[in-house]
Image (tube, rainbow, N blue to C red):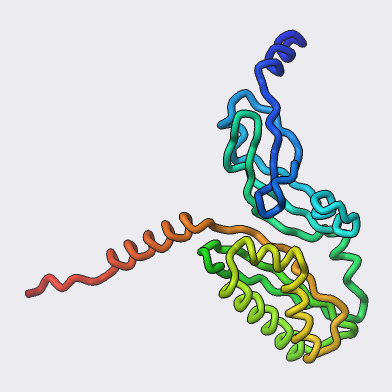
Amino acid sequence: MSERSVSKSREQKRWYTVLAPEQFDRQELGETLAEEPSEVVGRTITTTLGELTGDSGANNTKLTFKITDVGSDTAYTEFITYELTRDYLRSLVRRGASKVEASITVLTTDDYRIRVQPVALTTKKADRSQEKAIRRVMIDKVHAAAEERTFEAFVDAIVDGNLSSAIYGEAKLIYPLRRVEVQKLTLEARPSEVAAEEEAAVDVDADEVAVDTDE
């Protein structure tokens, strides 16, 4: 393609300002280029919590947003992933100590399905029964948090550190802990998707019911 053709192609495209959800005060996340608004929907953009809050100490947390709607020159997003950077996670690990992890899938009160992956770091090496007990606390606390929170409130509890603190407060009674973090949260399904899956499951169950034709 000639330079002239490339230039003409770029002239036909428009820049769209990408905004964070209302939960994050509609802050500007960046810009994206496209010829048609429909091309923008579905794109993702990743930033750090530090960039959103102005707190450089939060640059070890990555947030990913997905574009769901487009206005005249503005793209609106939903939050889909919270994740700690690999370098930060590596810095937490100490030789001779335990790293206890869990992966938990829950539904929030407004029927968002999310996967939560907390991690607890002990001061020294814990035995298997202690690690199992710490993992049980993580699972129970995540389920309890989801049972009383909307998706937005659950995300807030992770971003603010409230869920990590709740896990730490109880798990430290099992074995001394150095730190508890939620290393990743992922939006797996929205309410409409969850409802469609449940409806499909009901249809399958109905089809599997045996019918006695020997009458």
Residue 189: x and y, percent?
A: 54, 57
Instruction: Answer with left or right where residue 64 lies relative to residue 148.
Output: right
Q: Residue furthest left?
A: 215
Number of disc labels: 0
Residue 65: x and y, percent?
A: 68, 48
Instruction: Answer with left or right where residue 116 lies relative to residue 29.
Output: left
Q: Eyeballing the image, is 146 above or below 6?
A: below
Which corner quadrant holds the C terminus? Answer: bottom left
Q: Nearer the viewer, residue 97 or 73?
A: 73
Which corner quadrant holds the N terminus? Answer: top right
Q: Quadrant of residue 18?
A: top right
- Residue plotted at (69% across, 79% down): 138
- Residue plotted at (60% across, 62% down): 151
Instruction: Answer with left or right where residue 177 lies relative to residue 68.
Output: right
Q: Quadrant of residue 42?
A: top right
Q: Eyeballing the image, is 31 above or below 50?
A: above
Residue 154: x and y, percent?
A: 65, 66
- Residue plotted at (62% across, 34% down): 40
Q: Eyeballing the image, is 53 above or below 107?
A: above
Q: Quadrant of residue 165?
A: bottom right
- Residue plotted at (72% across, 43% down): 45
Residue 48: x and y, percent?
A: 81, 51
Instruction: Answer with left or right where residue 94 lies relative to residue 101.
Output: right
